[in-house]
Image (cartoon, rainbow, N blue to C red):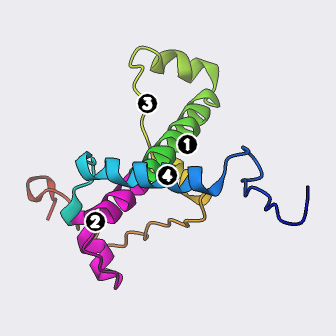
């Protein structure tokens, strides 16, 4: 290579030029204009504004919605794996009785374990009652 030639800029992992990356990013952002995310734009804009971020570009709002949707899907999948592992650890005699139902029950424990993997610590507050009948249906209270 002589001194006048410039080396082509490439990303280290895929051998693509930065122009290809810019083009792919532009194409992706333009595709977000026509995309309707699962999480409504108004909800995303509300939470972005609440955190102090405002941007009139709907593509950016939808990009945040897509990232949020991906995060929620990954957490839900991980929580499902924790639920399956928890139910697999139940003793065999109890598990045989539960096999008839075949429903998985997602618990706060499963969800908090999945969120902990992403750096989110979820703790639910303990419930304290002044009276043992607090929170019960009025028809079932023994007063």
**Closer to the camera: disc 1 or disc 2?**
2
Q: Residue at x 40, y 56 (%)?
A: 68
Q: Which residue in the protein does label 1 denote? A: 78
In this view, the residue in front, 116 or 46, is 46
Q: Earlier in the sequence, mark 1 or mark 3?
A: 1
Q: Residue at x 55, y 67 (%)?
A: 121
How many marks the image carries: the answer is 4
Q: Earlier in the sequence, mark 1 or mark 2?
A: 2
User: In what element is the residue under mark 2?
Assistant: helix
CA gap between label 1 and label 3 equals 14 Å
| Magenta-colored stretch includes residue 117 | no
Q: Earlier in the sequence, mark 2 or mark 4?
A: 4
Q: Is residue 78 left or right of residue 27?
A: right
Q: Which residue in the protein does label 3 denote? A: 104
Residue 49: % across, % down: 28, 80
Q: Would you say the residues marked 2 and 3 are in contact, meaning their CB atoms lie under 8 Å apart?
A: no
């Amino acid at each position: 290579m002589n001194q006048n030639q410039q080396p082509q800029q490439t990303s280290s992992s895929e051998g693509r030029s930065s122009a290809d990356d810019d083009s792919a990013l532009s194409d992706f952002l333009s595709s977000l204009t026509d995309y309707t995310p699962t999480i409504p734009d108004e909800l995303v804009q509300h939470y972005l504004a609440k955190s102090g971020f405002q941007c009139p570009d709907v593509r950016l709002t939808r990009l945040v919605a897509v990232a949020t949707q991906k995060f929620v899907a990954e957490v839900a999948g991980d929580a499902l794996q924790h639920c399956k592992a928890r139910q697999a650890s139940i003793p065999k005699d109890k598990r045989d009785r539960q096999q008839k139902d075949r429903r998985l029950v997602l618990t706060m424990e499963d969800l908090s374990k999945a969120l902990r993997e992403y750096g989110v610590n979820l703790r639910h507050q303990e419930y304290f009652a002044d009276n043992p009948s607090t929170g019960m249906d009025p028809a079932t209270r023994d007063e």
